[in-house]
Amino acid sequence: MEIALAKVAPATLKTGTLVVGAYADGSLLPAAQAVDQAAGGALVAALKRGDLDEKAGSTLMFPALGGVGAERVLLVSLGQRAALGDKPFREAVAAAAKVLAGGVAKEAAVALVDVDLPNRTPAWRVRTAARLLADGAYKFDAPRAKPVPARGAGRVTLIVESEPNGELASAVKAGLATAEGMALTKDLGNLGGNVCTPGFMAETAQKLGQEFGFEVEVLERADMEKLGMHSALSVGRASYSPCKFIVMKYSKGGAAKPIVLIGKGMTFDTGGVSLKPGANLDEMKYDMSGGGSVIGAFRTVAKLGLPINLIGLVMAVENMPGGNASRPGDVVRSMAGITIEILNTDAEGRLVLCDAMTYAERFEPACVIDLATLTGACVIALGAHASGLFANDEALAAELLAAGMTAGDRAWQMPLWDDYQGQLKSNFAEMSNLGGPAAGSVTAALFLSHFAKKYKWAHIDIAGTASVSGDAKGATGRPVPLLTEFLLSRAEAKAH
């Protein structure tokens, strides 16, 4: 999508669809007021009739209003004026994006960023709107016998109150780059496990490195064996698709210590010998979403050319049953030398992440953040609205929580207390890979904490947020917005 900034008179602008805003009390944003005056009060009359629902994100389309240059006008509700905040603003823009993406107009103009949001700058409003508009236009290119005709607005003008400046132009660029990273993450997640294999993820990372000029190394099974990554390799033993350990190195931060992102890239998770139930098993293709988010975040960072050093580690593995599969009761040795009893082969994510976390030590990182669809317990605890955040450093946790709030991609901090460590005890190894049914997301994070002793570390459990089920089934692209906001703030702090 192309997004431009312009200070123009909305009523006279010639475009396919013009988007303007209204409050639940019937009052209009400035751009909507100008359109209403040009159209002889048509918008206000519709509001008085109750044609537009008061809920933020409700829409009402006006075709061919007399006196207005646009071919059609879309009126969007911002909800109650007194309750105006980040969420109603995002809901209004996202609703407009959905209508524009499904409409016949090839170009559109959006006049919603002139709303006065508490504690949010014009740059934040522009960046958020650009990301939501571009993300709303995302369509998965599903294989079909006949191509589907393209619909939706490919060119959007964001109408602003004052002359566009460099700060606002940078905000548009950041919003679009974030949406691009989300789109790549979504594509990887939405592809079937027969296409998005460990090898496919590796090839995607390599192509991205070639496009943007950063280094990508792919370690094969033999390389991983030499490193002692027996924990990770135990998960992929029964798959015909060989394990791949993807190492991405983006270096534009001078001598600064790198930030390391680690992603669980379980391209399909059957549960192994501890086979999962058949219901909704197709959604286990999304178990690579942590790895997909790392690759997507790299696209965003590279597109923006952020002045940081960033390492991406993706352990791409497929967990299948078979004659060579790991068994409950097996004991494996991790790269760190810690022995692990496998009580359940479906608790596999932590087995691949722990070796990647040990590998991260060699970079002497400023911090390490791992991303994983790790536990169903996190879905039970937090549902689909917030990712679970665990950290061994409170300042890092606070940074990530703030980034999530700013991006509207929220996380919630969970305990990482030693009180739960006893649930991981084993009679046959130093620890087990399963802590029992109680506090499952906590014990999974505690397992990983054993491998994060040498650096500041945060674990983000995205099991509930990386994808959605039902009629809207698909990958969400989260937590790329959170990661982008975090990395942008780190880059800005470095610049100052």
Image: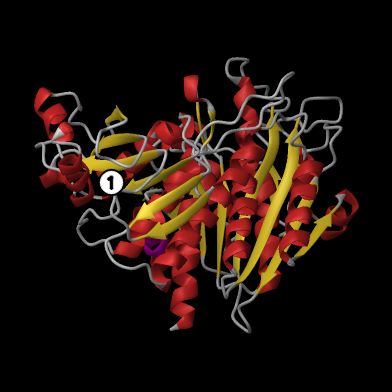
**Per the image, is 403 magenta?**
yes
- In the picture shown, does residue 482 fall above or below 422? below
Q: Residue furthest right?
A: 222
The residue drawn where x is 61% and y is 62% is 303
| Quadrant of the image occupied by residue 302 | bottom right
Is residue 235 rendered to the left or right of residue 439? right
Q: Position of residue 404 (x, y in %)?
A: 39, 54
Q: Does the magenta stretch include residue 334?
A: no
Q: Nearer the viewer, residue 100 or 137?
A: 100
> Which residue is located at x 50 percent, y 34 percent?
152
Above-or-below relation of 62 to 244:
above
Q: Residues within 10 Å of mark 1 (few under 14, many from 20)?
A: many
- The answer to whether residue 494 shows anywhere in this view is yes
Q: Where is residue 444 in the image (x, y as percent from the top left)?
A: 53, 44
Extent of the magenta region: 397-404
Does residue 392 appear in this view? no
Judge from the rendering whether residue 283 lies leftward or rightward of residue 247; answer left or right. Answer: left
169 or 457, which is in the foreground?
169
How many circles with numbers are drawn on the protein? 1
Q: Position of residue 349 (x, y in %)?
A: 63, 41
Quarter placement of the C terminus: bottom left
State the residue at coordinates (63%, 15%).
Answer: 278
Q: In which quarter of the image is residue 493?
A: bottom left
The quarter holding residue 166 reads: bottom left
Q: Is residue 251 or residue 427 the one in the foreground?
A: 251
Q: Kindly identify the amino acid type of the residue bearing the numbered disc 1.
A: Phe
The residue under label 1 is 89
